[in-house]
Amino acid sequence: INHHSVNPADPEGPDYDPETGAWNIEAQKKAYIVTDKALEEYMKLADDETYVLAISDHGMIPAHRWCDVDVLLAQKGLLTFKENGREIDFERSKVYTLATRGSEVFVNLEGREPMGIVPPEEYENIQEAVIDALLAWRDDLTGKRPIALALKIKDSQIIGFWGEDQGDVVFTYNGGFGWGAVYER
């Protein structure tokens, strides 16, 4: 529910409308009431041998500035687009992102990736270059840092990332920023 209602409900948002905001707050409240009732029904079905767990994939705060990480990485010479403008050229990119995973950067590692171009001895240098780019990034409009934290995968267990399916660099956004194409206000 938050993906669609958190931004319009934020009084500090650039497009805030009190009527729409109130409707979205009410939608959030109703979603939690429905969820609580569903959980209550599961609890009624549980006996002393049953565990009932309620898990959320993430929390969410409003984001009114969108971050195009691919463009940043291209500006830093780490990622190259094909001639069509937005498709990643894997034969020339040292790193890449996945459209479905907005807080990870993958090194295009030789021997691991089908078109890998980064030699294994350069792996950590590329991770450092990505981290440097992310942490030095300033939003053109606000002057603020979009990225709060960026870590090599080997150091990222503290924020819940580990394993071979994760990006080689993981990061989190500062409050007010989110994953998406940049637009000016």
Image: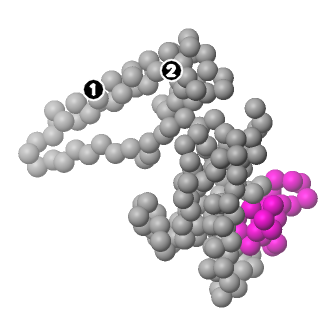
Q: How many circles with numbers are drawn on the protein?
A: 2
Q: Position of residue 89 (x, y in %)?
A: 81, 65
Instruction: Please state which of residues 108 and 39 is positioned toward the viewer in this rendering.
Output: 108
Please give the name of the residue rendered at 58% of the width and 67% of the height, measured from the top-left corner. 169
- Residue at the spot of label 1: 37
Instruction: Please state which of residues 44 and 153 is positioned toward the viewer in this rendering.
Output: 153
| Residue 87 in magenta stretch | yes
- Residue at the spot of label 2: 24
| Amino acid carrying mark 2 in the image | Asn
In the current view of this chain or complex, which residue is farthest to the front? 143
Helix, strand, or loop for circle 1?
Answer: helix
Please give the name of the residue rendered at 63% of the width and 67% of the height, measured from the top-left corner. 131
**Badge 1: few (under 14), some or many (20 or more) residues near its Cα, within 10 Å?**
few
Instruction: Please state which of residues 172 and 112 is positioned toward the viewer in this rendering.
Output: 172
| Residue 89 drawn above or below residue 37 | below
Answer yes or no: is residue 119 visible.
yes
